[in-house]
Amino acid sequence: MTVFLGVDTGGTYTDAVIVDEAATRVIGSAKSLTTRGDLALGVGRAVDAALAEAGVAPSDVALVSLSTTLATNALVEGQGGRVALVFIGFDDGDLERGGLVEALKGDPVIRLAGGHGHAGQELAPLDLASLAMAAEELGPQVMGFAVASRFATRNPAHEIAARDAIRRITGRPVTCSHELSANLNGPKRALTAVLNARLIGMIDRLVAACERHLVAVGIDAPLMVVRGDGALISAAMVRERPIETILSGPAASIVGARWLTGEADALVSDIGGTTTDVALLRDGLPEIDPAGARVGPYRTMVEAVAMRTTGLGGDSEVHVVTEGLAGGLRLGPRRLVPVSLLAVDHGTMVHETLDRWLSNDAVGELDGRFVIPMGGQTGGLNAREAAVLARISEPMPAVAALSSRLEVAALERLVARGLVMLSGVTPSDASHVLGRLASWDGTAAEKAVRLLARRRNGKGERFAPDAATLAQAIIDQLTAQTVDCLLEAAFGEDPSFAGETPEVLARHRLTKAGLSHHRGVVETTLRLGVPVIGLGASAPSYYGAVGERLNCRMILPEHAGVANAIGAVVGQVSQRATGMVTSPGEGRFTVHLPEGLESFTSRDAALAALEAALTADASERARAAGAEDLRVSVAREIREAEVEGQKLFLEATVSVTASGRPRVAHGPRSTAESA
């Protein structure tokens, strides 16, 4: 029997499913904790358990497809490796635009002369000598470089030259902005390149971990990865373009939701350990965001499903809000390792520490927090950050890693770099206290939540009298914030509210009154007009209350907990190539190709040449991405102006999409072939 294997690696769990070759039914599924220190362990445990449940041999697997939320989670939480931006031909104002300064987080910028004009002409020679000096100095301190040059989509020559020089000098990965998007807006392309460079190490480790286990168990099949638009690409390609995996997990979940339920119109809400991802399924298809994927605070140029991603999940950080007399709770956006999970492997340390904290009447600022070393590239740390990291040789109470309050900021920087993770109270701990979950150490969860309940509000009173009361308040807060997520998506997708701010509408007093069926001089009722498909392992625990609050039908399908892994193996491979034709003067038409500019005297000849080049490029990339039996579609957007009754050509954009089913292994090889 030939089968497909889907794997999804999230912040908390790694899921695996076995689907029959016709992709009509799930015959095996399994979940395993994601093992950040060595991702191969979590992947391996999930894959092996799914194969065992399905009763199939590794040699029966003809295709493996991987989706992940690791890249999305990293951007939402503001994490990732240290990178350097090579900024060619831009001015100081450009660096301030597009969220670049926030995305860089103090990482180095190499400003160089160079760049091109809107017609692709060189504005100034590229300063390769300065680049060589800076690259040699920064190479050991960063994990990768991002290169962005002015008007690189019209002429990428300077980005290519800088890339080649950096690779030769440092050996580090280099991301060029023109390779990620064909659109204008240099600062936004630079932002996308910076985020891509930040993610390269993380996604490379995931792909390598998956490949190692496939080899170890004898699975000889192509490995694909889900992109943010739901299409599949080869593992080799995603290693160079990890930014394309942002919203990979959510995109796979949309495909999985449609496959599992058959619903054509619905809001799909996928709650994981770190994020809640909401998208609209309309006429059986997800919407594609025309402005580029937005994740957390960043608007990228990556084509992806129109998805609202919020830092809210089962492992979200629980913040006790002390402002005001009564105070309150807030969840996310950062993910913590639940105390109940940390106690599974480090029970003695966790319980002894919690007991010591509970023996005191006063609650210290860092009581209830633990730190966990994660490893990784440490270049660019200052002396204080390096000193704190050196003390964190194993999981320990956070206070034990700090010698003074001055080091709290250093610890936060280590967390942002992904070198250290924090452990503390999360909704998963609250669910253990209430008996909704029993996966980890419930006693540790009760102690940690009881400790948090002892904190004081503005009145000087404890936040809650006991652990159960606070645990219920945490779950109620999760329900409230999930409702807001879904309402934001609903208002944002409803054309009647175009131009309005969905975040404001979702929290408006009339909206809240309508959900509560307010009856007075004014009567209001509000409900969602489409059902909600709840996905994620914890959806059955939380989403019943969400459906009641939204007065809508809540669909919790079988296999909802592994929908991402299902979506990973029922998708198509797709690659798009985009190019432009401009007109620098009457009767002159310039085709902008990756290898340079080409001039024509006829508009139609220029368009035909561009279409042929893009068709070859998209087809070649689709085959490299693992597709066969290609289908090619072409879209032209021609912009013209009317002058004295005559049409004047301005420019044209041509997009060619090549898509097909992923190649699969054609049955198990013989022993002789395998030798």
Image (cartoon, rainbow, N blue to C red):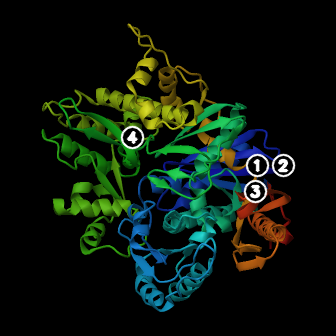
Residue 615 on image: x %, y %: 81, 66
- The residue singled out by tag 4 in the image is 441
Q: Mark 3: which secondary structure? A: loop
Asked if labels 2 and 4 touch by Cβ distance under 8 angstroms, the answer is no
Residue 593 on image: x %, y %: 71, 74
- The residue singled out by tag 2 in the image is 1
| Residue 468 visible, this angle | yes
> As rendered, which of 631 and 75 lies closer to the eye?
631
Distance, label 1 to label 4, CA atoms, is 33 Å
Give the amino acid type for the residue marked by disc 2 in the picture. Met
Residue at 34% x, 50% y: name it. 423
Residue at 26% x, 46% y: name it. 368
Single out the mark in the foreground, 4 or 3: 3
- The residue singled out by tag 3 in the image is 645
Give the amino acid type for the residue marked by disc 3 in the picture. Gly
Asked if labels 3 and 4 touch by Cβ distance under 8 angstroms, the answer is no
Distance, label 1 to label 2, CA atoms, is 8 Å
Instruction: Say whether residue 671 is left or right of residue 228.
Output: right
Distance, label 3 to label 2, CA atoms, is 67 Å
The mark found on residue 56 in the picture is: 1
Give the amino acid type for the residue marked by disc 4 in the picture. Asp
Classify mark 3: residues with Cα within 10 Å, few (<14), some (14-19) or many (20+). few
